[in-house]
Image: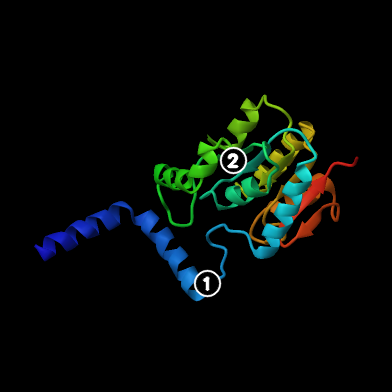
Amino acid sequence: MMLLHKLAQLRRAFKWRKQVAQAVSTQLSLLEDPDALVLGNLTPADEARLEELVAAAAAHEGPIVEFGTLFGITTRLIAAAARPGQRVITIDNFSWNPFGLPPAVQERFARGVLRTELAEGRVELWVGDSAAYRSADRGPVPALVFLDADHSYAAVRDEIAWARRRGVPIICGHDYGVARFGVTRGVDEAFGSGAVTVGGTVWSWERPA
């Protein structure tokens, strides 16, 4: 009986081998460095800067738009810092997470994390990729856009270009200065080197008054 159980486990491990490899990699990173940002969380400095930006967005009409929900942790921070009545729209196609969870499982987990905010109507979860959302968006101009989904140069470039065309007054994002991503190049090419403010690894640009 024990042998059959072990064989069944091995079959499941082989079936989900890519996801298992991702989960093991994440676990090893956490064991070696408990402060590693493998979960996609913000550092305290990142959180403080994002809260300042969300507070500044209270002066503008329109929702706050977040590209990259992941598990909904940063979404909750944004919703807590937003002014009463200012909706948060968070977008993710759930194609990546550090544990290799299937998209449906990741989405279910994120909805659980955000269950209070979703139930109260303070957060709207839009399931799909950034390009699909940008193509479909016909709503009011966002007060703030936070970019933390696809960190490639092309994705960051295109999201910034969309936000500027829409006239978004506060454009910001995560992981500025992280060498393995294309964020810094995309931001510097869009606004010019030194034109953005950086707190932790959160960069921001605000439209001149």
Where is residue 68? Give x, y as percent. 58, 45
Q: Residue furthest bottom?
A: 32
> On the rendered structure, is 33 left or right of 205?
left
Give the class, few, some or many, for how many residues have Cα within 10 Å of label 2's Cα (few <14, many ≥20).
many
Q: Nearer the viewer, residue 128 or 143?
A: 143
State whether residue 128 appears in this view.
no
Where is residue 136? Give x, y as percent. 62, 26
Kind of residue at badge 1: Pro
Instruction: Assess whether mark 2 and mark 1 are in contact (beta carbons under 8 angstroms).
Output: no
Kind of residue at badge 2: Thr
Q: Residue at x 68, y 49 (%)?
A: 81
Mark 2 lies on residue: 90
Label 1 vs 2, first from the N-terminus: 1
Where is residue 209? Give x, y as percent. 91, 40
Mark 1 lies on residue: 34
Q: Residue at x 72, y 47 (%)?
A: 54
Q: Residue at x 51, y 45 (%)?
A: 114
Q: How is the image coloured?
A: rainbow
Say above or below: 3 vs 166.
Answer: below
Secondary structure beneath dot 1 equals loop
Q: Residue at x 50, y 37 (%)?
A: 119
> On the rendered structure, is 194 left or right of 39?
right
How many numbered dots are placed on residues in this image?
Answer: 2
State whether residue 111 appears in this view.
yes
Secondary structure beneath dot 2 equals strand
Quarter where residue 57 is shown? top right
> On the rendered structure, is 153 left or right of 7?
right
Q: CA distance from mark 1 to mark 2?
A: 27 Å
Where is residue 196? Give x, y as percent. 82, 52
Q: Which mark is residue 191?
A: none
Give the class, few, some or many, for how many residues have Cα within 10 Å of label 1's Cα (few <14, many ≥20).
few
> On the rendered structure, is 169 left or right of 20?
right
